[in-house]
């Protein structure tokens, strides 16, 4: 598994004309080495892989990253790495320019000189296509959030605060096996459901409210990302109508998802349903994004992304309509691109759920 990922990183550095790739972003570092610590510098060369860590991580790095030569860097892992760079005569070293702060790049330039540090904006792309182990972890994560949603349906009622409901949801995910939450949960009710990322507040929910819940569980490093919108009591005609439009938009996008299709065409499949229903301006975000070790990663399912889908990519599909002062509806699933279409990982109910009021 790590061997295949190192191969992928080596193909990347060869195609970019680099002698080595310096990997510092936690998700990328974990991906190429297996090391889950919070700090460290990984360096992939054509021949070997190094991992320079500080005192806190000597043992953990050796245990988690057996494919790497672990450099014990004391309080200055970059200095340990610099020595290895010089002894190997590495001259062009790519780094994650979208991630490493400018000041840190300056410090690294001083330490690693005379090697040239080459900014690379697309290192995260290595993680776009998932392997079988990653897909299995994402499926487990989705199962945990699905079960938590089933639990919240039993307790979500008028009179409860958004915060209490979010806590129930989060406890259910932790009890169900989540090692942490994928992100701070969104739980927004009534007019607040028009906020795409509305955090739970002390608002007391009322009969007639739409409630948007956007939540995810992390399993073995990989996070799910699921949204459902429910109604407290009987939905009115407008709530029903909006729900139908969003669900149809999602269905059309899921039908369009298959290898070779440009990401933007999938976005367009959903967007055209919402636009022809008259709500084009009320769907202001991209249709979805990749998920994996990071909850927001590539490829974006956005109107601007021409990259074609490939088998093994795992993405969210999350159309929404948001009407300020009234409320909003979003439905979000996680899917894996297969050889001839896609498979949905999140299986929580998707019909318009009317909870007892
Ligand atoms: N939960 C954040 C998102 O859906 O993108
Ligand atoms: Mn979400
Ligand atoms: Mn999402």
Image (tube, grey):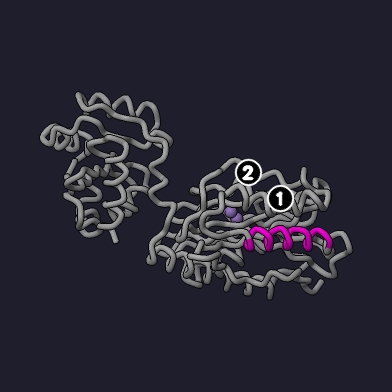
* Disc 2 C-beta below 8 A from ligand 1: no
What is the secondary structure assignment of the residue under circle 1?
helix
Q: Position of residue 269 (x, y in %)?
A: 68, 53
Q: Is residue 206 left or right of residue 98?
A: right
* Residue at horizontal 32 percent and vertical 36 percent from the top: 16
* Disc 1 C-beta below 8 A from ligand 3: no
> Badge 2 local density, few (<14 within 10 Å), some, or many (20+)?
some
Q: Is residue 23 left or right of residue 166?
A: left
Which quarter shows the C terminus?
A: bottom right
Q: Is residue 84 visible?
A: yes
Q: Nearer the viewer, residue 309 or 21?
A: 309
Q: Residue furthest right?
A: 237
Give the mark, 2 or 1, whose residue is nearer the N terminus.
Answer: 1
Tell me which image quadrant ligand 2 sits in.
bottom right
What is the secondary structure assignment of the residue under circle 2?
loop
Quadrant assignment, res 344: bottom right
Note whether 105 is above or below 129 in the view shown: above
* Residue at horizontal 51 percent and vertical 61 percent from the top: 337
Please say whether residue 206 is one of the residues in the magenta stretch. Answer: no
Main secondary-structure element of the magenta-colored stretch: helix
Q: Is residue 13 left or right of residue 311?
A: left
Q: Is residue 298 left or right of residue 231?
A: left
Which quarter shows the N terminus?
A: bottom left
Q: Position of residue 263 (x, y in %)?
A: 57, 49
| Residue occupied by mark 2 | 303
Q: Is residue 213 visible?
A: no
Q: Nearer the viewer, residue 47 or 162?
A: 47
Q: Position of residue 101 (x, y in %)?
A: 40, 31
First to last magenta residue range: 241-255
Residue 271: mark in rendering: 1
Please say whether residue 251 is one of the residues in the magenta stretch. Answer: yes
């Amino acid at each position: 598994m790590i061997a295949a990922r190192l191969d992928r990183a080596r193909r990347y550095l060869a195609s970019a004309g680099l002698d080595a790739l310096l990997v510092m972003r936690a998700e990328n570092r974990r991906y190429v080495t297996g090391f889950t610590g919070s700090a460290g510098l990984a360096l992939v060369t054509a021949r070997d892989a190094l991992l320079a860590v500080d005192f806190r991580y000597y043992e953990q790095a050796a245990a988690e990253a057996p494919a790497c030569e672990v450099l014990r860097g004391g309080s200055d892992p970059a200095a340990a790495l610099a020595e290895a760079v010089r002894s190997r005569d590495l001259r062009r070293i790519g780094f994650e320019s979208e991630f490493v702060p400018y000041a840190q790049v300056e410090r690294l330039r001083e330490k690693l000189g005379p090697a040239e540090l080459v900014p690379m904006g697309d290192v995260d792309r290595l993680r776009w296509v998932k392997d079988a182990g990653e897909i299995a972890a994402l499926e487990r994560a989705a199962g945990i959030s699905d079960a938590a949603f089933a639990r919240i349906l039993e307790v979500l009622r008028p009179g409860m605060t958004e915060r209490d409901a979010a806590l129930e949801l989060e406890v259910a995910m932790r009890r169900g096996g989540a090692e942490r939450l994928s992100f701070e949960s969104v739980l927004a009710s009534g007019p607040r459901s028009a906020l795409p990322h509305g955090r739970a507040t002390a608002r007391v929910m009322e009969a007639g409210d739409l409630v948007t819940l956007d939540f995810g569980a992390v399993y073995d490093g990989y996070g799910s990302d699921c949204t459902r919108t429910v109604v407290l009591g009987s939905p009115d005609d407008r709530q029903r109508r909006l729900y139908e439009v969003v669900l149809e938009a999602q269905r059309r996008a899921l039908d369009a998802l298959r290898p070779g299709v440009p990401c933007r065409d999938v976005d367009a499949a959903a967007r055209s349903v919402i636009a022809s229903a008259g709500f084009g301006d009320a769907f202001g975000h991209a249709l979805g994004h990749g998920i994996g070790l990071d909850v927001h990663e590539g490829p974006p399912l956005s109107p601007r992304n021409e990259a074609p889908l490939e088998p093994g990519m795992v993405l969210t599909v999350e159309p929404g309509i948001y009407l300020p002062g009234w409320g909003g509806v979003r439905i979000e699933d996680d899917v894996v691109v297969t050889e001839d279409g896609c498979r949905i990982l999140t299986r929580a109910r998707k019909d318009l759920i009317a909870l007892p009021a």
